[in-house]
Amino acid sequence: MDESRRRLVVVQVLVVSLFLTLFARLWYVQVVGGDDYQAQAAENAVREVITPAERGMIVDAQGRPLVASRPSWVVTVDRDVTDEMPAAARRRVLQRVALTVGMSYEEVEARSLRCGEDGAARPPMCWNGSPYQPVPVAEDVSQQVAVSIQEQGEDFPGVEVEKWQVRAYPRPMGVNAAHLLGYLSPITEAELTEAESTGEETLNRTSQVGRAGVERTYDWWLRGVPGVQRKAVDSMGGVLDTVSVQRPRPGNTLVTSIDARVQSVVERQLRQTILTARRTVDEVTGRRFVADSGAAVVMDANDGRVVAMASYPRYDPATWVGGITSPELARLYSERAGAPLLSRAMQGQLAPGSTFKPIVASAALTHGYTPDSKLNCSNSLAVGGLDFQNYESTAYGYIDIARALQVSCNTVFYRIGYGYWLRSGADSGDVEAADPVVDMAAAYGLGRKTGIDIPGEASGRIADRRWKRAYWESQKDTYCKLGREEGDDYRHRLAREFCADGWRYRAGDAVNFAIGQGDTLVTPLQLATVYAALSNGGTLWEPRVGKAVVSPGGEVVKRIRPERSGRVPVPRRVVDYIDRALAGTTRVGTTAWRFGGFPLDDVPIRTKTGSAEVYGKQSTSWLASYDDRYVVVMMVRQGGTGSGTSGPAVRRIWESLYGVQKGAVHPDRAAQPGARPPARLPVFRPDGSIEPPVTPERNGSR
């Protein structure tokens, strides 16, 4: 066989082999894998459209809705229709929509774009949902506008009006409670990816997710399960038929421990106190008080449940509904506006002033001092070459610790702190030196988060030897560099001194620490847990806002139990001694002038005032108070004295709790709303109505 013939045979064999391979593959695809490929093709022809679930309500302890959902008319654009139009026709439709809903064409155009398209902005301006779902371009339009668009359908091709559910704030008793409730914002790509990887059915591209407050903590319980419509589409994406419909399941209801009536009083009193302080002249500086922020907490002393918690300045939680604008978001973070997004109750960290003294008394009475011990309440005390003054230089002579608490004598507590400082090695630099006051502050829960079921809590700070050493190590390079520069002013001298031995815990640090001054910081919520422990005999509780999760059908899905976080290592006799002393503060001490005529025999309130001084700032007003049921704490930053500024408001809060009128407790004290925190849950009726908890007096049970 010649060479050309052999080549022809080889080519023929290759051709036959290729055909055999092709036929074999065709047979495999059609016969062996036919069912699989047919299923995949069918799947490609079906698209899912998400129907958002109605998010669950958030109610107060009496069943009053704090957050609900309401119907909202939403104008949507079907991109499958408008994308088929000539550009000019599509522009005319969107211009007509913009004119009708009162928006600019540019905004409507931006909202109609899908995220990722050319020219699209970031969420929530662009559409982050399904490409087969109509795109919302205007929300919360009036019913008149909705009807107008529906009646003129020929002028609005591809435009529909739908009813969606959005967050609503009924504001019972006028409450705001923004920092407690939190807000929602669109799901992020990272959250969506995680949800898809775990098979989480409650989240999709259209989801709104809790970002703060109880909306975030109990987000999963509140979400509900979205509905899904499976639609058959042709190769061009046009809808042919609805294959199946899975209706959405609404979210659960969160019952909180908040009492809207008490919350309303607290918010109103806090705001009024701050506004009044701003009109009051500070006798120390000769200027009006800045009173730039404040907070108040009402807590159940026996289990840590939060009855009311307010922060000022505040913001409107409805600001987030439908997506927040950049200017609005900037204002919430703005220092000029007072950073309204910051919850001063659990994130505001300030020196506690004299409200810290019961902690020092606890340390003293368990480490060498007795109820019979008497110390000199002189008008000043010389320590480390400096004179540390008593408030207004008042002297009371030799008094016991109880009287020192009642008149808030600084020099008595200076002496206690100074004595322990000497015993602990003075300024030796031993960061492990034992200090009863430092240890007691930690035992009362300071320097760490309380564990409240709201995210973002601050931990505060105990400014002891260990903290001062760590601070010096973190700052010494900066100060040493400044100290090496030429200059003999105060700033350069301070830098050189700090560079040399700023790590030393000096006598001045110890005496300041003993009266809650210096670098120690607490939050109002932390202080409330301290005074709750004094009320209940020494138990520290993790504060709770959530009380229970209830299904849409009214069944209790989850009870949120209070959690103990520790016990203060103080004998009951010492706690009782401090308790009696603070009862005297209200009758004959620093708050007596604010509680004249109050029925203290029926409601024996214990109080402790504080006026924390900060260099370059006006004093922070503190007032902590409690009885056998409640703790009430108020703080006004740069607001003046504890009793002078916060006293009237704290008294009114107590009056509202017990229905005090004209100096007398309401005759039916037990029946007063708020006079006893409800142990039971609201009653959820089959018709959707909610009734207050059934009390034993009404012969019911829950």
Image: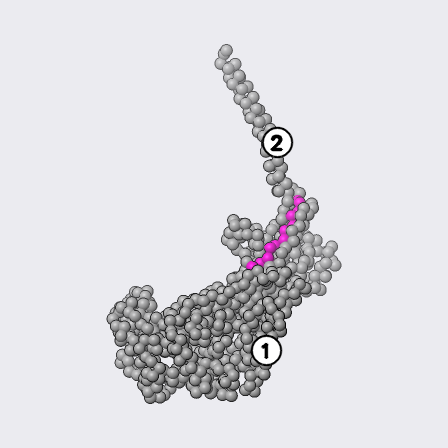
Separation of marks 2 and 1 at Cα, in angstroms: 79 Å
Asked whether residue 169 is drawn in magenta, I would say no
**Residue type indicated by callout 1:** Ala
Q: Position of residue 626 (x, y in %)?
A: 47, 78
Report whether 420 appears left or right of 128: left
Any part of residue 83 in sight: no
Query: Closer to the N terminus: mark 2 or mark 1?
Result: 2
Q: Which residue occupies 49% across, 70% down?
A: 303
Residue type at the position of mark 2: Gln
Mark identifier at residue 671:
1
Where does label 2 land, which residue?
A: 30
The answer to whether residue 102 is left or right of residue 344 is right
Q: Is the residue marked by circle 2 packed among few (<14), some (14-19), or many (20+) residues within 10 Å?
A: few
Of tags 2 and 1, which is closer to the observer?
A: 1
**Mark 1: secondary structure:** helix
Q: Horizontal and vertical percent for residue 39?
A: 62, 39
Q: Is residue 168 left or right of residue 484?
A: right
Taking the spot 63% from the left edge, 67% from the top edge, the residue there is 690
Q: Position of residue 556 (x, y in %)?
A: 58, 62
Q: Nearer the viewer, residue 488 or 453?
A: 453
Establish if 9 lies above or below 216: above
Q: Using residue 646 as the reference point, say whether residue 74 is left or right of it.
A: right
Question: In the image shown, does 458 or 441 lie closer to the viewer?
Answer: 441
Residue found at x 55% / y 24%:
18
The segment highlighted magenta reads 221-233
Q: Is residue 225 magenta?
A: yes
